[in-house]
Amino acid sequence: MSDDKLVGYVSDELFWDPKVDNEAIAVSADDGKVTLRGTVGSYREKLEAKKAAERVYGVKSVENKLEVKLLNGDKRDDAELRGDVLQALMLDSLVPKTVDAKVDDGLVTLTGTADWQYQRDEAEFVSANVFGVIAVIDEIGLKPSPSATDVKHSIKEAFKRNAKLDADDLTVTTSNGTATIEGVVNSWAEHDQAVAAAWFSPGVNDVDDQIIVDY
């Protein structure tokens, strides 16, 4: 697929996504690598724009250079914003009580500990939805893990159980809680399934994603 056609497809996908204001987003492509530039009104919208671009067939990677810019009347005091973020985290049963947050000029940094990666993901998702947040940095640590052999085995088994993945085309190595995944997949959906399967395995505290998306 030509880059011009890919830009058109991505632009159309952004247009049809009601969570994204496509008029403020410029799209470019270079050999299947898409870059998003422009401004959006919330951090959640920035994340949704990247997801929309990744859904398009032919996209090999997405560099999200969108900037979050709040209108002057929408900017919030850091103390008030932190209170709302903490309240949102507390009300979500998937987020452990060991997670804390600090705010600096609209930038939320999540700290503390969690047992599972999905809990970190949930904390970031919840924080991103709070009005006034311009970015989220996830520094939540995962608790100590099982042996590297057990981690590798659990990831490979998760790959085999997933109907959307060809486990034979992916290799996994583990070291000190970091799972490195290498191989080639046919779509971003398959890529995301593989990365998610690795993160959901007990004992993984980092994923080195070296998967290539090749159509």
Image (cartoon, helix red, strand yellow):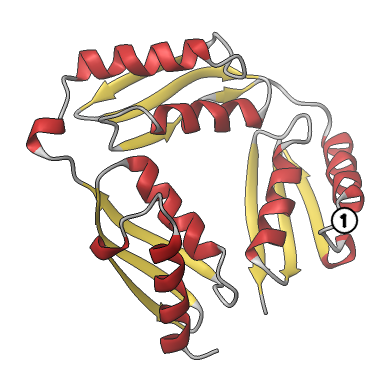
Quadrant location of residue 3? bottom left
| Residue 199 shown left or right of residue 96 in the figure | right
Q: Where's the C terminus, which quadrant?
A: bottom right
Kind of residue indicated by mark 1: Ala
- Asked if 155 appears above or below 53 in the picture, the reply is above
- Asked if 35 appears above or below 44 in the picture, the reply is below
| Residue 37 picture location, percent across and down | 28, 64
**Which residue is painted at 51% across and 79% down in the image?**
32
Q: Is residue 99 visible?
A: no
**Which residue is painted at 86% across and 51% down in the image?**
162
Query: Mark 1 highlights which residue?
Result: 163
Quadrant location of residue 151? top right
Q: Is residue 2 visible?
A: yes
Q: Nearer the viewer, residue 162 or 154?
A: 162
| Residue 79 picture location, percent across and down | 22, 13
- Asked if 144 appears above or below 90 in the picture, the reply is below
The total of numbered circles placed on residues is 1
* Helix, strand or loop status at disc 1: loop
Q: Nearer the viewer, residue 81 or 157?
A: 81
Circle 1 residues within 10 Å: few <14, some 14–19, many ≥20: few
**Which residue is painted at 80% across and 53% down in the image?**
172
Q: Where's the N terminus, which quadrant?
A: bottom right
Q: Which residue appears farthest toward the bottom when viewing the image?
A: 2
| Residue 120 picture location, percent across and down | 56, 28
| Residue 13 picture location, percent across and down | 46, 67
